[in-house]
Image (spheres, grey):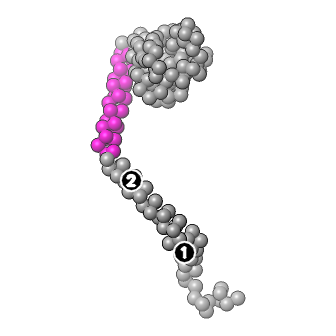
Amino acid sequence: MQFTDIKNNTWTIEVTVLTCKRAKKWLEIDLFDLEQFFKIVQDPITLCDLLYVTCKDEADKRGVSDEHFGGLLAGRAIRDARNALMEAYINFIPDPAAAEKVRVIREKYETVGEKILQTLDKRMPMILKQLENATDQFIQELGRELDGEISPVAHHAASSTHTNRNITGNLSMNSPELSE
């Protein structure tokens, strides 16, 4: 399985017994633990570390360190690398029934991601409008403060008075608490 990084370098991902041994030794990741594997593919940092392990021999040939490799992964490259890793992982699993379960989980994972993006696409105009309105309101209030319409001290005093009214609202001028 292959993916392309942000500098258009193509990398080949292979999941083998050697990959599993390296992941366990270097990252303390057990690739035979499906739950752990699916947590890793959702965490971009750990995912990039695992991707480096899967591409280690190729990275060594190119003189690419793990830090440099991580710098080559962002956005679409991470997504494509994750998908390639998942496909390589499915191909590695010797039990066809287990491989099919992973394939189904991967498809559900992708479907959920697509639905989230579709929902965001539909709601984006409303979200942007709300953000624009909130920004405009903030700028207007800030402008009034800067123009002296609402002094920060007066605003604070008004807030304090309001709070004090709530606390002392039941006290009268003749109450023993105030006469001392």
> In terms of depth relative to the viewer, which is nearer, 99 or 145?
145
Residue lying at the far bottom of the rendered structure: 174
Answer whether residue 116 is magenta in the image.
yes
Residue lying at the far front of the rendered structure: 147
The quadrant in which the N terminus is found is: top left
Q: Position of residue 62 (x, y in %)?
A: 55, 10
Q: Which of marks 2 and 1 is nearer the N terminus?
A: 2
Q: Which of marks 2 and 1 is in front?
A: 2
Q: In this view, does 143 lie above or below 11?
A: below
Identify the residue at image location x=59%, y=16%: 65
> In terms of depth relative to the viewer, which is nearer, 114 or 130?
130
Q: Position of residue 160 (x, y in %)?
A: 58, 73
Residue lying at the far right of the rendered structure: 180
> In terms of depth relative to the viewer, which is nearer, 60 or 110?
60
Which of the numbered marks, if any, corresponds to residue 158? 1
> In terms of depth relative to the viewer, which is nearer, 165 or 96?
165
Mark 1 closeness class: few <14, some 14–19, many ≥20 residues within 10 Å: few
Identify the residue at image location x=41%, y=14%: 2
User: Which segment did they paint magenta?
Assistant: 97-124
Residue flagged by tag 2: what amino acid is it?
Answer: Glu
Q: In this view, does 110 lie above or below 123?
A: above
Q: Where is residue 121 in the image (x, y as percent from the top left)?
A: 31, 40
Tag 1's secondary structure? helix
Answer whether residue 74 is magenta in the image.
no
Which of the numbered marks, if any, corresponds to residue 67? none
Give the residue pinned by disc 2: 132
User: Relative to residue 40, is residue 171 drawn left or right?
Assistant: right
User: Relative to residue 127, is residue 50 drawn left or right?
Assistant: right
